[in-house]
Amino acid sequence: MTEHAQSDDPPVAGGCAHPIRLLGHLDHLDTRTGEIRRALTATELPGGALHVRCNNRRASACPSCSRLYAYDARRIVLAGLVDPPDTPAALAGHPALFITLTAPSFGPVHSRRTPGPRAQTCRPHRGTCSHGRPLGCPAHHPDTDVRLGTPLCLDCYDYAGAVTWNTMAPTLWKHTRDRLESAVAASAGLTVSTFRRQVRLTFVKAVEMQALGLVHVHAVMRIDGRTTNPDITAPPPAWTTTDLVTDCLRHVLATIAAEAPDPHQPTEPVATIPIRWGEQHDIRPISLDGSTSTGKVANYLAKYLTKSVRSGGTLDRPVRIPVHLARLLIPAHTRRLVETCWQLGAHADFATALDTAARRQPGPTPGLIRWSHTLGYGGHWLSKSHRYSTTFGALRTARRDHARVTAAVLAGNPLTDAFGRPPGDPATAILGAWRYAGRGEASAERNVGAAPPGGSPSDPDLARAGGSR
């Protein structure tokens, strides 16, 4: 390939570091006549294959996809906090809460306490543990200290409890949401069914993997009223104040628990332990008035999302066999967490009981082993209720349509499908037949030329619009 071709060639899959190559074709079907016309063939594209994004949220794995994920996540959060342009003042005045939930302690760790202008002593304790290591730390840790979040004694830390907590965190959150509805309904003197006919609790949740290997939850909960039309957001009843919901939520957090098999007795899966939230939590009311306060909340959640995609102690890819773990240059604390996942996952009865408690789908590999690279956590890093706001799919569809229109305009092609109809016409169905061909850019010389009709050589989501991989 010449230097000129390299400079003029558009980035593959939007600059994705590890694009997925697909072979196949895309057809357009006339739903009225049954006629099928070929719209796109992979061999016509640069490199002889369709390149789509890997969509890896980890910045160390793919900076381009990670930036796009963080951008889309912020849009999802912000879309549920500000008024939609077509329905003025639809959300103004709705009670809303910003919630931070933490994990319990599984052993003393190095920390940075800053109640004043400078960091205080990490842990002003004396003596040694049963393993002969100090129980305290006299250091004043700076922000960049690699010891922050690591246990004072690796042998004293409850690694089995930590990975079990990470596994059960999504289930504990679901129990909390369900119990909160019951608590608010009881406070108002209503049954749960009557409450749900009047009020809808919507939320968006961002999960932060801390440096000590435990997940924390940051969520925005919005209180909406229900109408006969589920697509219309109405003001909630006057009695659903933030003070009422906050009091109910504090009571739920103090009493809620999810049952899980005891990781300290993996050979006896009948024994169970309660999984609870940590004692530290923060609940703050926020105002949905369309001002800069909503943008600050969105930026706050985006900060934790960005943190989770760039750091947090998790590995970029799954650990297939323990031998691979020995070759990775990772902190000793993270290594112990991953090893604990494999050790507990080796007990078939315990692993099955834990997957059942966490409501994971059964598979050939236990969930602890399958998600050992995320220290046992197998949930979504960003999730939301159905009616909160837009979705990742809607944002990707809009971006795909924009890329297709832009490519067609630049190439001088008509903005029509294979039958001359405008894109999205209900009379045209899209049929895709794609198969996996590998990762990374094709090694063959890429053909630089005009974009094919209806698509772009670098369109990252074109295959997903037309069919399965």
Image (cartoon, rainbow, N blue to C red):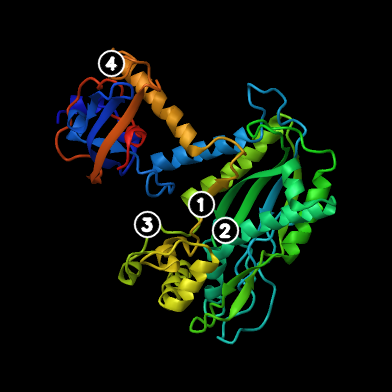
Q: Which residue is mark 1?
A: 380
Front residue of 308/378: it is 378
Residue type at mark 3 is Arg
**Residue 421 quadrant:** top left
Label 4: element kind: helix
Real-space Cα separation, disc 1 to disc 3, in angstroms: 16 Å
**Residue 25 quadrant:** top left
Q: Decide: marks 1, 3 in contact (CB < 8 A)? A: no
Rendered location of residue 441, percent (x, y):
23, 40
Residue 150: tell me if it is visible: no
Q: Mark 4: few, some, or many residues within 10 Å (few <14, many ≥20)?
A: some
Residue type at mark 4 is Ala
Q: Decide: marks 2, 1 in contact (CB < 8 A)? A: yes
Label 3: element kind: loop
Real-space Cα separation, disc 2 to disc 1, in angstroms: 8 Å
Real-space Cα separation, disc 1 to disc 4, in angstroms: 39 Å
Label 2: element kind: helix
Real-space Cα separation, disc 2 to disc 3, in angstroms: 21 Å
Front label number (2 vs 3): 2
